[in-house]
Structure formats: C-alpha cells, structure tokens
Image: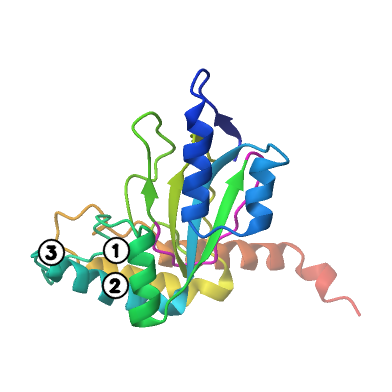
Amino acid sequence: MVYVGIPKGQADQEEEVLKTIQDGDSDELTIKRFTESREKPGALWHIYAAKDTEKIREFLKKVAEEQGQENPVDHDPIHDQSWYLDRSLRKRLHQEYGVQGWAIVQFLGDVVFIPAGAPHQASTRDMEWPDCLGSPLSMWLMLVCSLQVHNLYSCIKVAEDFVSPEHVKHCFWLTQEFRYLSHTHTNHEDKLQVKNVIYHAVKDAVGILRANESSLSRP
C-alpha cells in the first residue's frame, strides 16, 4: 500500500471506517493499529483457503437462485465479478458450508502476499476509487486462495502477479475454467499464458546451464 488519502473536514469518516473494520471481523490488534497507533488503513481484505473455492461458488449460486437470478452454464459467479460477501453473507457461508476466512486490514506501507489462484472482490465507496481491481469476486490472481477487498479510503495499491513452480498446476486449472466461459466474457481469453511462461522459464534455465557448462563439468 503506497498511498492512503484521508479527506479533510469529514469528522464522521473515521467512525465509519472503524465500524467497517469492526464489521469486517478484524481482530483487536488490527483495530488498535487504527484507534491507538493512528495508522492509515487503506483496504480491508477477506482471504479464504483455496480448497474452499468450490464451496464459495456453490454458495453464490444458491444465493443467486434465492434472489431469482439465473446461473447460465457459460458464466461463473466468481469470474463474473458480480458478488461481494458482506457480513451477513459471510455469516451464512460459515454456518451453511463451514467456510471461514481471515480478515486483514492493509495499512499504509503494508504488503499482502496472496497464494496462487484466488477469487477476490473489491468494493469501493462513491468518494474514492482504488486500483484496477474492478468490482467483486474474481479470480485475477494466478494464485490459490479466495479473497475480497474493501477499500476504506482513497488508496493506491501496487500489485505484482507471478507464477511460482509450486502452483503451476493451479494456473492450468484456472485456464481450463476460463475456457468454459462464454466467448463474450471478459475472462474467456487465456490471460495467464501459462504454457508461454513455462516455455520461457525452461529456455532461460537451459541457456544458463549451457553458458556455464564448462564450469559445471569441472571436478
């Protein structure tokens, strides 16, 4: 988090942010960073284990049906970026599916590392616009957990996506999911380009080995 802009002349804004942090199920230490240490909170994250992704998807489909919405086979409640898990939905998710995540408030200067393959969502206030995350739950990160982001103040977050060798299989799995989306879906194209990543990684590794072949062959 490289910038957090707190508007001047809005005394009630701090109380509203505190309520959002508390309603987000943040722990006491996090709340004290805001109320006592006076650190600047930029975003509220909810992160879920990758293994719970299917349960989250099933839950969102269930809620959609309850609201009279359709669930087309070539669409996905996560990739469609059409949901935000507020406190009531998070409570239902825990009660009905046993899924519970972690609440993390990202303050100015904080870094949040997210494992590969993660559905995430961003919710913003009218007075601010964060980064390019867009709206709700999506699987942008080529990584393995589920998460959502609620921006507390106007903020700038710098994101860096990467593919680690340990999670290449999750990237292939995610690419397969994209293939089943409709051709007009924004996530239908192969954004990850995992095969190209693997090809160039192996090519660079082989090039380095060949360049140092003579020194490597010495006893």
Name the one closer to the observer, 17 or 185: 17
Q: Which residue is mark 2?
A: 57
Q: Residue 146's spot in the image, x, y percent?
A: 43, 66
Quarter occupied by the C terminus: bottom right
When asked about the image quadrant of residue 94, the answer is: bottom left
Q: Secondary structure at mark 2?
A: helix
Q: Are marks 1 and 2 in contact (CB under 8 Å)?
A: yes
Q: Secondary structure at mark 1?
A: loop
Q: Is residue 138 magenta?
A: no
Foreground: disc 3 or disc 1: 3
Residue type, mark 3 in image: Gln
Q: Which residue is mark 1?
A: 78
Q: Residue at x 25, y 69 (%)?
A: 60
Foreground: disc 3 or disc 2: 3
> Which residues, given as a range, are shown in magenta?
108-120
Residue type, mark 2 in image: Arg
From the viewer's perspective, is 209 left or right of 51?
right
Q: Residue 129's spot in the image, x, y percent?
A: 40, 33
Q: Residue 142's spot in the image, x, y percent?
A: 45, 62
Q: Are marks 3 and 1 in contact (CB under 8 Å)?
A: no
Q: Is residue 136 above or below residue 145?
A: above
Instruction: Describe the colour scheme in one phrase.
Output: rainbow
Task: Say whether disc 3 or disc 1 marks the residue closer to the N-terminus.
Answer: 3
From the viewer's perspective, is 107 left or right of 85?
right
Query: Does the rendering let one see residue 41?
Result: yes
From the viewer's perspective, is 27 left or right of 193?
right
Task: Say whether disc 1 or disc 2 marks the residue closer to the N-terminus.
Answer: 2
Q: Which residue is mark 3?
A: 67
Residue type, mark 1 in image: Ile
Q: Is residue 118 magenta?
A: yes
